[in-house]
Amino acid sequence: MNAILSNYSASISELKKSPSSIIEEAGDEAVAILNHNKASAYLVPAQTYEKLMEIVDDYMLANKVKERIEDTDELVEVNLDDL
């Protein structure tokens, strides 16, 4: 059985009937959308989604920095006074 990672849940039928009431009831929390009692999607507030995208972006940038630091073939020595 898969875990439902939300305090709120609604069936797809409930979502079709009244999406705004489900969003309103959950407030700032995500809603698990269930299909045959299994989470098929999560309805996430815009603020939460935006924050998640920032976290993912930071993670991707950190990985790129790590790759570039480990790639010693293209290192260029500079003098700070020359910058």
Image (tube, rainbow, N blue to C red):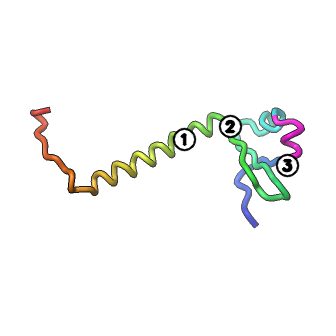
Q: Is residue 26 above or below residue 5?
A: above
Q: Earlier in the sequence, mark 1 or mark 3?
A: 3
Question: Marks 3 and 2, Cα distance to the nearest angstrom?
Answer: 17 Å
Q: In the rendered structure, which amino acid carries the disc numbered 2?
A: Pro
Is 78 left or right of 54, judged from the image as shown? left
Point out residue 71 in the picture as x, y percentages from the top left corner: 26, 56
Which secondary structure, mark 2?
loop
Question: Marks 2 and 1, Cα distance to the nearest angstrom?
Answer: 12 Å
Name the residue nearer the viewer: 8 or 34: 34
What residue sits 83% from the left and 47% below the top? Answer: 10
In the picture, the quarter occupied by the N terminus is: bottom right
Q: Is residue 46 magenta?
A: no
Residue 45 found in image quarter: top right
Q: In the rendered structure, which amino acid carries the disc numbered 1?
A: Met
Point out residue 53 in the picture as x, y percentages from the top left corner: 54, 41
Q: Main secondary structure of the magenta part?
A: helix
Pointer 3: what residue?
A: 11
Q: Which residues are magenta?
A: 11-19
Q: Residues within 10 Å of mark 2 (few under 14, many from 20)?
A: some
Q: Which mark is residue 53?
A: 1
Q: Earlier in the sequence, mark 2 or mark 1?
A: 2
Q: Earlier in the sequence, mark 3 or mark 2?
A: 3
Q: In the rendered structure, which amino acid carries the disc numbered 3?
A: Ser
